[in-house]
Image (spheres, rainbow, N blue to C red):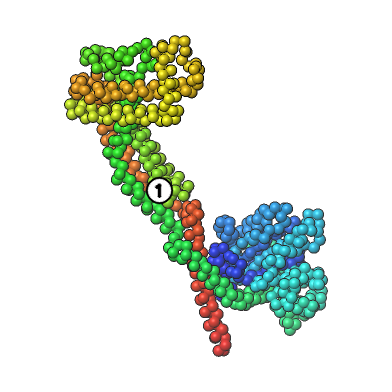
Amino acid sequence: MMVLTRKMIEIRTILQKVGQTGALTLPSIVVIGSQSSGKSSVLEAIVGHEFLPKGSNMVTRRPIELTLVNTPDSNVEYGEFPALNLGKITDFSNIQRTLTDLNLAVPEKDCVSDDPIRLTIYSKNVPDLSLIDLPGYIQISAMDQPEELKAKIFQLCDKYIQPPNVILAVSAADVDLANSTALRASRRVDPRGERTIGVITKMDLVEPDRGSNILKDKNYPLRLGYVGVVCKVPQSGGLFSRHVNVLSAITKNENAFFGQHPQFAGDQGLTVGTYSLRRKLMEVLEATMAQSLQGTSDAIHQELEEAAYEFKVQYNDRPLTAETYLAESLDSFKHSFKEFTELFGRPQVRMLLKQELDQRILDILAQRYWNKPFSDLKKTRPEDHPLAELSKVDPEELYWHRKLDGSSSALTKLGIGRLATNVVANSLSTQMEQLIESSTFRNHPFAKKAIQDSANTILNERFYATSDQVENCIKPYKFEIEVDDREWAHSRENAQRLLKDELKACEDAYKRLRDQIGGKKLGSAMTFVDKIRTGRAPEMQEGSEALGFSQAMLEKGREGIFLRDRADIIKMRMLALKSKGCATKDNKYSCPEIFMDVVAEKLTSTAVLFLNVELLSEFYYNFPRELDLRLGRHLSQAQIEAFAREDPKIRKHVDLQQRKLLLELALQKMDSLMALEKSKKAQGDEN
Ligand code: GDP
């Protein structure tokens, strides 16, 4: 059992997650050879399956980092591409197809790519090994294999055949060894032949004498020696061949072949057969791993120290994972939501709705009582303004009854249900957005959307029911409004306050206009418009550019007059509301502002009751649950990771912590492995 290799492969898998840096690379066996030297056949024999891309065209364009993991207790053999998330692939022809696709995906113009394909094969029939298959060296430069390709393959192979890797140099027996590209490449980087294993394939194609001489080669002696193999799969299987273990078929074949010839007999001291090759690879890799233990351990130590230092300096050792980050963010969001629910209740909804209705009242009053189009004013003097008559209203006069009833209907038939529900729903929606903006979720588009969706889902679900309920309940007010004295007094104050606010708004707007174009200019523009309107400038057509007033300036003039007139009217009405005339509800026809407020108050109070039950309480109850559904435990690990990674700061923090943890784990494994090696060595010394 090659414990070391196995453990080291485990450690390497961990280090790969860290994002392996050069210093952390563990030794592998790198397979090089010319095209058609039989390289693929050797690798497939070791794995026991056909799985490498085949074809006349150069199909290996990317290095394949092949990890073999021995699983003695399992009868299932499968491959995994850790980077691709394809799961376990038990059909080796599927692995072959995937590899072919991955290779062919390298653009023709790039020829080869040094981005490795990682493939791990799990089987009880494979040893623990780490192999790297590289594109075969090409001999002749044909049309479709440009000179550049040859150079690129050399470069790529050179990158991989550096120490501490072991080189498996594959050469065919029927080609003169002196011409073996693989051996020549190996000799350049390993001149004394210390870490190269020579594999001579196609031993069946040469005379046994010549074959055995090749294996005894003295020109380029290798400390790890030459191994002769016959890796041709016997063509007997037909349809079933895929299910036959390639290695056992080949071994049977090899035993028959080498057994026939005394040149390969045991006393010759030669190593032949794929099975022996496999054994050798395991031993050599194990020994190489043992040699690199200390170096790798030191490298991990150093990486870990750097990561730990950075973690301390940057994050004060504060632990953070994607899960805890999400959980904390969600908790604190829910917490601020809870706070919000305490601040936004019936009184606030009431205020919102009343404000909205106040605006509608101002519009209705303006339309039905206050506004006089300019064309009318042209003919009337201020004392003819209908408002002047309002103070002298005869309570029996039908005209004023209709006017007030119409105004009140305009309000009650506004579609209060929809309006009220809309106001509250919009406000909730906006406030949720503000909550998001002041939470950690503001940097997370995914979570932001999930929260907005949560809010909108509930609000949409509740909208029609709420709106219908409200509309139903305010129905009586569409027909009759009863007022008592207390209500009248309260609304009288409200109406005065509303007019005061409106007056201020008017005056502010007028001030802004004056500041914008200057008091003098505004004054003369207004005087001019006034003249046109009252007919004192009869020759001037309104709208014509005259006396240096541009169209835009005339517009400003009109706006100024509108604001001035409106302010005058409001002041007049404020006086009226203050006066004795408006003190009792009996005079409601002269005081429409107060009556409209009574109506609005009634509508608001009724609406708020239902808004509270149907919308607010439902929202407050369901929103946190909806959030849990969308952002809580239902998210997959990948979604949680993706969420945390949206924030670059968090991504860095989580990554660094992850890196540190993985390095710690790798180091821990490394330490126990070294302790094991030490005790093995001590035992060996004793014996
Ligand atoms: P690669 O291009 O180096 O990967 O070479 P392959 O493994 O595809 O082999 C090239 C050809 O040589 C194929 O037709 C194999 O069947 C054949 N081949 C490989 N090994 C042997 C061997 O040991 N003996 C014989 N006779 N043919 C072999």
Q: Quadrant of the N terminus?
A: bottom right
Q: Quadrant of the C terminus?
A: bottom right
Q: Which residue is mark 1?
A: 438
Which of 412/677 is in front? 412
Q: Front-most of 293 and 509?
A: 509
Percent x, y of residue 653: 48, 59
Residue 50 drawn at (x, y percent): 67, 62
Residue 196: x %, y % from top left: 70, 74
Q: Nearer the viewer, residue 381 or 439?
A: 381
Q: Residue at x 35, y 28 (%)?
A: 507
- Considering every residue shown, the one lying at the far left of the view is 485
**Residue visible at 49% across and 69% down?**
664
Residue 73 at least partly seen: no
User: Would you place residue 623 above or below residue 426 in this image?
Assistant: below
Residue, far front = 520
Q: Is mark 1 within 8 Å of ligand 1?
A: no
Q: Quadrant of residue 284?
A: bottom right
Q: Is residue 352 visible?
A: yes
Amino acid, disc 1: Ser
Provide the secondary structure element on which disc 1 rests: loop
Give the crowd class for mark 1: few <14, some 14-19, many >=20 residues within 10 Å: few
- Camera-nearest residue between 149 and 332: 332
Count of labels shown? Answer: 1
Q: Residue at x 47, y 10 (%)?
A: 539
Task: Tell whether 66 sits left or right of 633.
Answer: right
Q: Residue at x 41, y 11 (%)?
A: 535
Q: Position of residue 296 (x, y in %)?
A: 58, 73
Q: Is residue 652 left or right of residue 584?
A: right
Q: Which of the 4 image quadrants contains residue 618?
A: top left
